[in-house]
């Protein structure tokens, strides 16, 4: 049996994460929750609206800090980072896709996709080259210069996915990535996510109500009493 002390750390090791929202009544969303993720693994987070799926994803993606707990990426607790270092870590390591695309409508597909590279400090030409490559990969070769306001919902979601993949993240986090799409476009996004997972050994954590998409994931979890529980 391998010595656990000498084994490399997993991609993510979250321990005893707690998160509450304090209004007129304090609501505990996460209660000493644990979560592990290996490189290239795919996980669906399921459950009814309001149980904390998006909150968990935001904490896991370091968009929000938990009240207590540890969040280790490849052995390093990123919750100890200051805000600038944490933002740099997110930009380099995590891709995000949301139900609402958060694209800039007055900019083209290419310009929207270039943003993470420009924020990272890359030259405009390098950012443009990388953005063109990934937009072609997601099937938008003929839409590079179109303003995103002129694109269909499915095309906009593929721009959002291209933007998330630009920095070649080790993990992609998606919150209802097909929630606003019809069946045909949903299936295209499903196929693309799974293809990229295989090609890039990129881990996926997907919040979804779509049971077809969830069925493609290697694990399915739900939040029960603030804990992450394997679904039946």
Image: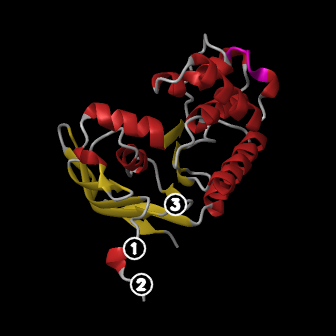
Per the model, the C-alpha gap separating discs 1 and 3 is 14 Å
Observer-side mark, 1 or 3, equals: 1
Highlighted range, magenta: 143-147
Q: Residue at horizontal 55%, vertical 30%?
A: 100
Whether the residues at callouts 2 and 1 have beta carbons within 8 Å, the answer is yes
Under circle 2, the secondary element is loop
| Quarter occupied by residue 203 | bottom right
Q: Tag 1 or tag 2, which sits nearer the N-term?
A: 2
Of all residues, the one furthest to the right in this rendering is: 142
Observer-side mark, 2 or 3, equals: 2
The residue pinned by badge 2 equals 2
| Quarter occupied by residue 58 | top left
Tell me if residue 147 can be seen. yes
> Taken as a whole, is the magenta stretch helix, strand or loop?
loop
Under circle 3, the secondary element is loop
Q: Is residue 35 left or right of residue 144?
A: left
Q: Residue at horizontal 63%, vertical 42%?
A: 178
């Amino acid at each position: 049996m391998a010595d656990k002390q000498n084994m490399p750390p997993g991609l993510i090791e979250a321990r005893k994460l707690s998160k509450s929202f304090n209004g007129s009544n304090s609501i505990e969303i996460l209660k000493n929750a644990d979560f592990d993720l290996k490189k290239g693994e795919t996980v669906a987070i399921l459950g009814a609206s309001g149980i904390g799926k998006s909150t968990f994803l935001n904490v896991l993606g370091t968009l929000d800090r938990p009240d207590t707990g540890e969040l280790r990426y490849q052995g390093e607790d990123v919750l100890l980072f200051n805000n600038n270092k944490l933002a740099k870590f997110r930009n380099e390591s995590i891709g995000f896709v949301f139900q609402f695309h958060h694209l800039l409508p007055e900019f083209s597909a290419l310009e929207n996709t270039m943003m993470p590279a420009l924020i990272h400090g890359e030259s405009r030409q390098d950012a443009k080259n990388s953005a063109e490559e990934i937009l072609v990969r997601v099937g938008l070769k003929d839409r590079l210069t179109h303003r995103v306001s002129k694109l269909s919902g499915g095309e906009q979601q593929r721009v959002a996915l291209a933007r998330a993949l630009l920095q070649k993240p080790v993990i992609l986090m998606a919150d209802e990535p097909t929630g606003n799409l019809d069946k045909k476009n949903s299936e295209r996004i499903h196929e693309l996510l799974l293809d990229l997972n295989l090609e890039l050994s990129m881990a996926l954590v997907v919040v979804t109500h779509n049971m077809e998409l969830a069925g493609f994931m290697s694990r399915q979890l739900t939040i029960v009493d603030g804990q992450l529980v394997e679904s039946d």
